[in-house]
């Protein structure tokens, strides 16, 4: 048998401080020697699980501290292999490894107390690799000591028994392990406390505070021994009841008591004992301050069971509505001050002002009243006193009382009217609650008998609307009548004005502010339903000014003017205190900062009414602006409203905030829709149908080029510039979807019909409509598109085609409406902004939306020009949509917006906040469109 040749391999080992590992380096490649060298090594699964890395161009075997320790300490002699160390450092590692392994195997190590104090929290055992370990008795080389600590931490991952022991230590002493700065005793105390040194006592030492039997007596403090399973708790002073096996741990208990006194020095009594009695002030200090220090240091505390509840308890100022308060005789306006009886409440215990003042004067801290302990925190007392003094000085306005009552009685009563904890808690009596019920439910209101001077018949829901307006007027509360378009807001207001005229005979007129386009409509409705009301229309270049205006207004029951003149002629309008100020299409003041909105808010009126089918078109700030006109201060300042409601609802979809806001506005906002069962209008059916059209090749090319160019430019733009680019692009793509000539601004468009399939679809629909001798409304948001359609249709059908836009004078508008209603011109084109509100066009039974506004509320308002009271025919709504474009994609999104239309909607500015990728997905033409165009 031939003897195998002896192979010699030279290895060197380096320590990588950054990665906390050893690197064993030999001849390249490592595969030529590593399997042989580690064939015996269990920790690397006999050389099969080696981690080979490249260092400075050479391959090396990476070893953890524990793997390196077992490799160097247990390296056997191999007959066919000779290992040599390439340097003194590597040779030293073998020497140190044998010393270290003896410490580890015999468990002659412990957590390093000084390192723990300096480095802080080892945390739960998974973080135990950060724990320092030190040898006991052996004087190791500094690096060997470091290696020992790292190897043990590594070993904790592998040894189930040691791992379990360390887990128990960490879990049993979370506060001690987490807060080394709280430990003021020595190393032996620490090792004993955590159970590493010596026999661990079968109990922990804690402190118990016992309340006095009577208010004002001394409090008892004692050391207690608590069994590990908490089955037994015994006072250390009660030696007779101590288990026999516990009595031998007197030194450990004494050490624990000394530690308590180190943490809280003033707890020490005579001769190093623990103080047995505490005064009320000392008990307060112990509970509110020292208990936190002791707990952080890992001390078990047994405190009175009521303390946690009392600690969380907030002193509250309670205002109880005076029994003498009578809503019918005491209220006028939400800023009316309300009389209250004052109380201070702590949990279920209430104090009168006098009782509270007496306790404060005596500087009491812990008081037992009627069997309940309460804590009088000095800082909290100061805040309560400040709150009470302010409330007494300024009074409590009805708006705060009403708002808090409305919110706290919603389904979610946890929503506070104010954000701070020291809010005045308001208690109201049954009479006031009955008043609240009436505010909340229009069906609970007394009926207002409309006088014979109102020459019309109110439907039941309209009568309830008049009842509501009259009821709110009685108390000086502003009202927002937000019925769907077409449900008769105009005649409800006229019936209300007739009622006020007959019952109150006011000395000043009412003021109606409306868009110029509907002044004529109001004049006609007044003449029809309230001919006895003298109406003065303040409009036109020859309108009265100064004294002439006052004289003209004094002769009238109702003054009608426009939003524009409300600003221009505000000095004249401010001279009169109107018995009612009514805003029609109140969304015109949705921006509270405009000169127009500010001028209107400065007008004086006994009662204020806002009419709007869409009190919120885009943002909740619009609702705030309307309410700031109706009931100033009720919804707080604009900043408060944004913080409390608008932000959480619009940005986070906070349902709780939405519910609270709805509770606040519901008494002052009445909205009914055509589909409400209570309305019972029996209107004819309305069918909404989407008509899809392809882009022409020219449209598709323009669309694609605009989108790509804009997205490219947006990449390098700042946020403000990017927003502007996107909004400009959105307008452009909508124009392209309508007609290329609109986007290209062609003065004399060529081949008008051929270049837009949407225009072809419009002509097809109109051919059918006219064949059936029916009338049609066509809405577009672009005046130039309206001009193009008007000229084309007039040529094709050889009949008058009307076009109403913002530049048409009032007299011409009225003639157009009359022509259409008399069916003298069956096709009526309207620009969406000029004709979308305030007009009765019930002669139409077809409504065509040539382009989309991307806001369901605005589109529905336009549709309601035909689908409203007075309509006797089936109404067919056509919405023209170009397929594969943003029109189709936005239409899909609109379907999801309809659920928010009653109170909360969004605008189209959200598109500007999309990422580049999201924008590209929304705007890019579908492949089918590119190919088909």
Image (cartoon, grey):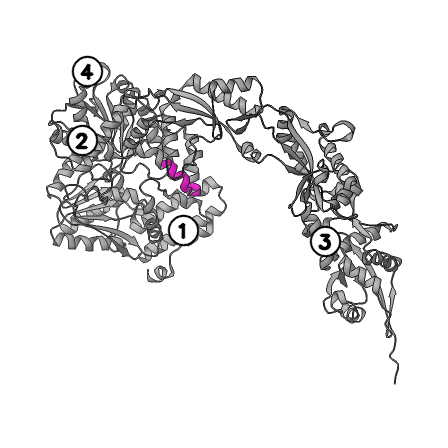
- Give percent across and percent down for residue 908: 37, 44
Q: Which residues are magenta?
A: 650-661
* Residue position marked by numbered label 4 in the rendering: 551
What residue is shown at x 88% (from left), y 85% (from top)?
1
Residue 568: in magenta span: no
Vertical order, 229 against 354 (above or below): below
Nearer-N-terminus badge (3/2): 3
Distance Cα–Cα, label 3 vs label 1: 67 Å
Between marks 3 and 2 in the image, the one whose residue lies nearer the viewer? 3
Q: Nearer the viewer, residue 480 or 430?
A: 430
Residue neighbourhood size for the residue with mark 3, other residues' Cα within 10 Å, grouped as few (<14), some (14–19), many (≥20): some
Does any portion of residue 30 appear in the rendered image? yes
Question: Which badge, 1 or 4, is on the more N-terminal residue?
Answer: 4
Q: Label the magenta part by its dominant secondary structure.
A: helix
Magenta segment includes 656: yes
Quadrant for residue 225, please give it: top right
Q: Earlier in the sequence, mark 3 or mark 1?
A: 3
Q: Nearer the viewer, residue 86 or 849?
A: 86
Mark positioned earlier in the residue sequence (2 or 4): 2
Q: Residues within 10 Å of mark 1 (few under 14, many from 20)?
A: many
Q: Nearer the viewer, residue 897 or 660?
A: 660
Q: Give the alpha-carbon distance from disc 4 to disc 3, as whole Å.
A: 98 Å
The residue at which mark 2 appears reads as: 522
Quarter of the figure with the C terminus: bottom left
């Amino acid at each position: 048998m031939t003897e195998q040749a002896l192979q010699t391999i030279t290895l060197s080992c380096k320590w990588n401080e950054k990665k906390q590992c050893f690197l064993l380096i030999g001849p390249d490649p490592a595969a030529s020697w590593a399997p042989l060298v580690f064939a015996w090594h269990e920790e690397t699964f006999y050389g099969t699980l080696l981690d080979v890395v490249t260092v400075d161009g050479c391959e090396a075997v990476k070893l953890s501290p524990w793997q390196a320790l077992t490799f160097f300490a247990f390296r056997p002699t191999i007959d066919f292999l000779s290992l040599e160390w390439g340097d003194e450092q590597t040779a030293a590692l073998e020497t140190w490894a044998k010393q270290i392994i003896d410490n580890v195997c015999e468990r002659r190590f412990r957590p390093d107390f000084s390192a723990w104090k300096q480095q802080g929290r080892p945390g739960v055992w998974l973080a135990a690799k950060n724990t320092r370990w030190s040898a006991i008795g052996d004087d190791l080389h500094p690096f060997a000591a470091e290696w020992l600590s790292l190897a043990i931490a590594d070993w904790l991952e592998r040894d189930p028994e040691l791992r379990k022991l360390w887990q128990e230590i960490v879990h049993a002493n979370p506060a001690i392990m987490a807060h080394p700065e709280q430990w003021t005793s020595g190393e032996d105390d620490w090792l004993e406390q955590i159970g590493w040194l010596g026999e661990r006592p079968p109990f922990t030492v804690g402190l118990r505070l016992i309340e006095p039997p009577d208010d004002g007596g001394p409090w008892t403090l004692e050391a207690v021994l608590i069994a590990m399973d908490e089955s037994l708790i015994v006072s250390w002073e009660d030696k007779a009841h101590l288990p026999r096996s516990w009595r031998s741990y007197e030194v450990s208990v004494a050490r624990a008591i000394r530690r308590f006194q180190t943490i809280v020095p003033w707890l020490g009594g005579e001769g190093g004992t623990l103080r047995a009695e505490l005064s009320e002030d000392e008990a307060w200090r112990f509970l509110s301050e020292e208990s936190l220090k002791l707990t952080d240091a890992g001390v078990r505390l047994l405190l009175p069971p009521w303390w946690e509840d009392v600690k969380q308890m907030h002193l509250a100022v309670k205002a109880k509505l005076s029994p003498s308060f009578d809503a019918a005789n005491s209220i006028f306006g939400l800023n009316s001050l309300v009389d209250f009886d004052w109380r201070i409440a702590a949990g279920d215990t209430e104090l009168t002002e006098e009782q509270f003042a007496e306790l404060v004067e005596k500087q009491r801290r812990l008081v037992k009243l009627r069997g309940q302990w309460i804590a009088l925190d000095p800082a909290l007392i100061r805040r309560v006193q400040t709150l009470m003094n302010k409330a007494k000085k300024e009074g409590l306005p009805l708006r705060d009382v009403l708002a808090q009552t409305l919110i706290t009685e919603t389904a979610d009563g946890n929503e506070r009217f104010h954000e701070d904890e020291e809010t005045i808690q308001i208690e109201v009596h049954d009479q006031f609650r009955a008043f609240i019920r009436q505010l909340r439910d229009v069906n609970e209101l007394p009926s207002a008998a409309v006088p014979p001077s109102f020459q019309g018949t109110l439907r039941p829901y309209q009568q309830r609307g008049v009842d509501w307006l009259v009821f709110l007027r009685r108390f000086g509360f502003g009202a927002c009548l937000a019925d769907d378009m077409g449900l008769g807001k105009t005649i409800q207001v006229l019936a209300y004005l007739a009622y006020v005229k007959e019952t109150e005979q006011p000395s000043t007129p009412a003021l109606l502010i409306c868009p110029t386009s509907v002044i004529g409509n109001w004049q006609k409705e007044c003449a029809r339903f309230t001919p006895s009301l003298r109406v003065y229309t303040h409009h036109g270049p020859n309108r009265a000014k100064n004294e002439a205006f006052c004289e003209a207004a004094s002769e009238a029951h109702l003054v009608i003017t426009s939003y524009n003149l409300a600003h221009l002629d505000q000095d004249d309008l401010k001279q009169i205190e109107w018995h009612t100020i009514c805003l029609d299409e109140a969304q015109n003041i949705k921006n509270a900062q405009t000169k127009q909105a500010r001028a209107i808010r400065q007008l004086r009126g006994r009662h204020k009414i806002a009419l709007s089918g869409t009190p919120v078109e885009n943002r909740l700030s619009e609702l705030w602006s309307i309410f700031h006109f109706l009931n100033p201060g009720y919804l707080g300042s604009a900043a408060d409203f944004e913080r409390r409601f608008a932000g959480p609802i619009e940005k986070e979809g906070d349902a709780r905030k939405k519910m609270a806001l709805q509770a606040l506005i519901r008494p002052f906002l009445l909205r009914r829709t055509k589909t409400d069962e209570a309305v019972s209008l029996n209107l004819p059916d309305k069918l909404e149908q989407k008509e899809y059209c392809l882009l022409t090749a020219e449209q598709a090319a323009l669309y694609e080029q605009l989108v790509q160019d804009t997205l490219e430019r947006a990449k390098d733009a700042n946020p403000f510039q990017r927003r502007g680019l996107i909004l400009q692009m959105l307008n452009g793509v909508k124009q392209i979807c309508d007609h290329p000539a609109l986007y290209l601004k062609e003065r004399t468009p060529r081949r008008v019909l051929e270049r837009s399939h949407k225009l072809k679809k419009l002509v097809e629909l109109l051919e059918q409509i006219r064949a059936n001798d029916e009338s049609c409304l066509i809405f577009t948001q672009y005046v130039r598109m309206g001009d193009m359609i008007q000229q084309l249709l007039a040529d094709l059908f050889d009949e008058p085609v009307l076009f109403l836009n913002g530049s048409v004078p009032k007299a011409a508008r009225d003639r157009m409406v009359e022509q259409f209603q008399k069916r003298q011109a069956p096709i009526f084109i309207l620009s969406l902004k000029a004709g979308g509100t305030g007009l009765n066009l019930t002669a139409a039974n077809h409504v065509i939306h040539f382009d989309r506004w991307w806001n369901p509320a605005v589109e529905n308002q336009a549709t309601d020009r035909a689908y409203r009271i007075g309509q006797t025919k089936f109404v067919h709504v056509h919405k023209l949509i170009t397929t594969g474009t943003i029109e189709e994609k936005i239409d899909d999104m609109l379907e999801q917006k309809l659920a928010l239309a009653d109170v909360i909607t969004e605008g189209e500015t959200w598109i500007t906040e999309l990422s580049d990728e999201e924008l590209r997905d929304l705007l890019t033409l579908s492949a089918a469109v590119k190919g088909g165009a």
